[in-house]
Amino acid sequence: MIKQFICMVVLALSPSLASAGVIVQNLSVARNTTDFDVPVVFALFDNLSSGRLLESVIVELFARSSGNIAVENKSTTRSANITATLSTSITLLLQDGLTSLSAAPNATRTDKLESFDGVTDYNGLSGVQFLNIATNDYEVMTFTIPSFLNLFTGNGQGFFTFEALATSNVIGGGNLATEINTFASADVRITYNYVEVPEKGTIILLLMGVMAAVTRKTIYR
């Protein structure tokens, strides 16, 4: 009976022994001309000295693509209905080299260009410039499996590999002069959700206190 009572008390107090917590890291990749890859360094979750247990990790990728596209119709006999797409393939690769978040921000512009006016200036009736195009994409992944949580756990720093490859293009005619400038940037947010794990000594003291209270109650019954 006493054992059952002790177990019931410990179970009732268990929620108060562990407290939830959140750590958020906001990282950024500066705007640069594609194609490029850079490391994104982040702080690992230290559960060795802090007595904390990592329950889940959320990785968010806010990917951005921007740039300019200029098109000149070089056909001297026909107009051209052109479609210009500014796009980037952005990948955030985890430390295992296998797991990744992939985003594809893209924006499309269209126009009808008349036959070539004799000057390749991306202007006039036969040319167009799409300037300061900007677009974005968002991807998120949540990790709860221990093998993945281990990628974020330890002392010091970890890193992602951020890769941005331009996929911009222009279609709509067989005689086009094009000039494309594609840039990429991003923000990365890492959220650690954890619980504080009580030290073994705290649990032992709690049990001793419960047992003493039960024993005292039994003696004076």
Image (cartoon, rainbow, N blue to C red):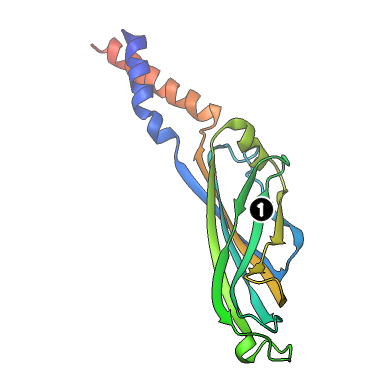
The image quarter containing residue 218 is top left
Determine whether, in the image, residue 191 is placed left or right of residue 126.
left
The residue under the point 70% across, 84% down is 76
The residue under the point 49% across, 23% down is 204
Spot the residue most to the front. Answer: 77
Spot the residue most to the top. Answer: 1
89 or 127: which is nearer to us? 127
116 or 195: which is nearer to us? 116
30 or 51: which is nearer to us? 30
191 or 64: which is nearer to us? 64
How many badges with numbers are in the image?
1
Give the x, y percent position of residue 32. Answer: 72, 70
Give the x, y percent position of residue 72. Answer: 68, 82
Determine whether, in the image, residue 185 is placed left or right of residue 58.
right
The image quarter containing residue 63 is bottom right
The residue under the point 58% across, 62% down is 105
Label 1: state its secondary structure.
Answer: strand
Give the x, y percent position of residue 210. Answer: 38, 21
Determine whether, in the image, residue 219 is placed left or right of residue 104.
left
Q: Give the residue type that dot 1 points to.
A: Thr
- Which quarter of the rendered picture does the N terminus lie within? top left
The residue under the point 65% across, 78% down is 68
Give the answer, above or below, for where 191 lies relative to 216.
below
Give the x, y percent position of residue 35. Answer: 75, 63
- Which quarter of the rendered picture does the C terminus lie within? top left
Which residue is tagged 1?
Answer: 91
